[in-house]
Amino acid sequence: MYITSSEIVGVLALILGVYGGYRFQALSVSGGIVALLISFLIVLGTGIKGLFLIGAFFVTSSFWSRFKRERKRSADERNEKGGKRDGYQVLANGLLPAIASIGFAFIKNDLFLFIFIAALATANSDTWASEIGSLSRKKPVHLLSLKQVEAGTSGAMSLLGTIAAFFGALLIGIVSYFLWNEVSLTIALLIALAGFLGNLVDTFLGATVQVTYYCPSCYLVTEKRKHCGMKTQYKQGLRLFNNEVVNFLAIMLGSLVILAFI
Ligand SMILES: [Zn+2]
């Protein structure tokens, strides 16, 4: 495979970016290593453009993750791992985009490119929804019961989070329109819609099958396996469906939606 000088600059920017993510506590050590591996696969598949798109996802997600972090403490308590992304979380978000990107390099079919972009649109939509949504001044409601729940509860939805989900998906669609000739404005908008629908699937799975635990000491309902120095107890959901599995499935469905559209 022929490597251009812009790709070398891109790879250097990538290493700096991942290091920055680690330094600013957006990534754990395992998260940083997996992010590097995934990004290398994406550069191999879709080149500097793919790297730029994953950069747009990573930079904006990290920004929103750190934005007004003090106000998000209670949501961080519920989420499995808080603000830092670890290897499993990066893999849940990045595995499908990486496979699609490599697929695009070997089988020159635009559908792989659209899957790659739609997967990132879903991941971005989901991240923006949870990071911005948890800043909502009004408590979110549970998708199925429509009752008010605490911010950060899986399956919770707020108006702010839903708007954020839409713009998170739209950003990826618009950026890809400017990056690739293959992406027309119609396809960019369909990709944004697929990403948004993928995020709704994420919320739906969060409201139905995602596993939750509770702390036997303070009775907090959480995704964490430990709280107050104790092992948390099973509350509801299917044990297999933790946050990463739900993320991965939502991204897969967001990608399938784009296939159904085109
Ligand atoms: Zn506790």
Image (cartoon, rainbow, N blue to C red):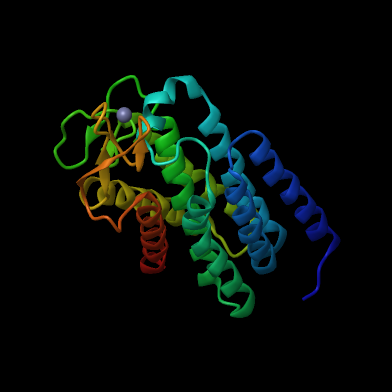
Q: Quadrant of the C terminus?
A: bottom left
Between 52 and 33, the one lying in front of the other is 33
Q: Quadrant of residue 74?
A: top left
The residue shown at (60%, 52%) is 54
**Can residue 188 be seen from the camera position used here?**
no
Q: Quadrant of residue 245?
A: bottom left
Q: Position of residue 20 (x, y in %)?
A: 69, 39
Q: Position of residue 39 (x, y in %)?
A: 64, 58
On the rendered structure, is 197 left or right of 96?
A: left
Q: Quadrant of the N terminus?
A: bottom right
As drawn, 40 above or below 52: below
Quadrant of ligand 1 in image: top left
Between 244 and 13, the one lying in front of the other is 244
The residue shown at (74%, 50%) is 15
Q: Residue furthest bottom?
A: 107
**Can residue 87 be seen from the camera position used here?**
yes
On the rendered structure, is 247 left or right of 218?
A: right
The residue shown at (30%, 46%) is 203
On the rendered structure, is 45 left or right of 213?
A: right
Between 23 and 16, the one lying in front of the other is 23
Q: Position of residue 10 (x, y in %)?
A: 76, 54
Q: Position of residue 182 (x, y in %)?
A: 59, 65
As drawn, 192 above or below 27: below
